[in-house]
Image: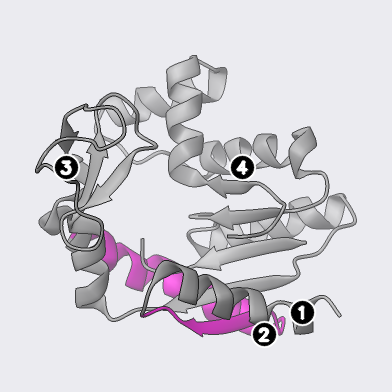
């Protein structure tokens, strides 16, 4: 099963491929693509679509993605969506669904701006409102310091949402024309939203 997750910035036995994770992994490992991306970022420039597309394609080529994947944060614009279509066509593959998670904008800001990450292990994630640590600013798991990433600050999130409206929302219409979009109300607990998403998928791979 091959799925694109679209939503303002999973219980499937397929890898969850996040653009943010791809960038961090390539940069930290010093891969050629990571070095190229970092050179743009260090200069204060946007990373070109060609680099992002190459990272995504490289990840989709890995063995654990042979039976499918969930793409999160890619494609982010029409150019990337068309490149993904070309990649899949070359591999004689197709997408099964595009999940459009609908969340009110203020709720998006609250969810992201409230996120707190452990400095010792970024997989330890808490939230100022929805998943509070036992002691403020301290990771329940390892005792590390919890902090707010610059990307998660409210003003940054709102700027990202502006970009989302202008660049990412158009891909929903692009995929609607291919009859791939499944719109999911994404308010509520994570497990509830996950159940809604999973329930929507069988009709797409029947």
In the image, which is nearer the foreground, mark 4 or mark 2?
A: 4
- Disc 4 is placed on an element classified as helix
The quadrant in which residue 9 appears is bottom left
**Pointer 4 or 3: first along the chain:** 4
Residue at image mark 3: 148
What kind of secondary structure does the magenta stretch mostly adopt? helix
Give residue 30's mark. none
Q: Earlier in the sequence, mark 3 or mark 2?
A: 3
Q: CA distance from mark 4 to mark 1?
A: 25 Å
Q: Give the residue at mark 4.
A: 56
Q: Secondary structure at mark 1?
A: helix
Q: Quadrant of residue 111?
A: bottom left
Query: Disc 2 marks which residue?
Result: 177
Residue under the point 64% across and 74% down: 198
Sequence-earlier tag: 4 or 1: 4
Check the image and name the residue furthest to the front: 134
Q: Are marks 2 and 1 in contact (CB under 8 Å)?
A: no
> Are circles 4 and 3 on residues that touch, CB within 8 Å?
no
Does any portion of residue 128 appear in the rendered image?
A: yes
Label 3 or label 1, whichever comes before in sequence order = 3
- Whole-percent x and y of residue 88? 79, 55
Query: Which residue is tagged 1?
Result: 202
* Left/right of residue 126 with respect to residue 30 in the rendered view: left
The stretch in magenta equals: 159-187
Residue depth check, mark 4 versus mark 1: number of the one nearer the observer: 1
């Amino acid at each position: 099963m091959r799925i694109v997750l679209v939503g303002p910035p999973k219980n499937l036995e397929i890898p969850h491929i996040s653009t943010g994770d791809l960038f961090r992994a390539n940069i930290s490992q010093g891969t050629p693509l990571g070095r190229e991306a970092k050179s743009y970022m260090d200069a204060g420039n946007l990373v070109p679509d060609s680099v992002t597309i190459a990272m995504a394609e490289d990840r989709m080529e890995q063995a654990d993605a042979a039976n499918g994947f969930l793409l999160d944060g890619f494609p982010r614009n029409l150019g990337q969506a068309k490149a993904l279509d070309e990649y899949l066509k070359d591999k004689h593959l197709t997408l099964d669904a595009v999940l459009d998670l609908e969340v009110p904008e203020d709720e998006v800001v609250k969810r992201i701006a409230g996120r707190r990450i452990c400095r010792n292990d970024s997989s330890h994630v808490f939230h100022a409102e929805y998943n509070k640590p036992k002691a403020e600013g301290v990771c329940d798991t390892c005792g590390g310091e919890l902090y707010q990433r610059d990307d998660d600050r409210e003003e940054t999130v709102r700027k990202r949402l502006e970009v989302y409206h202008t660049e990412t929302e158009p891909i929903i219409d692009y995929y609607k024309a291919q009859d791939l979009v499944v719109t999911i109300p994404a308010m509520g607990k994570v497990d509830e939203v996950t159940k809604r998403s999973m329930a929507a998928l069988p009709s797409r791979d029947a």
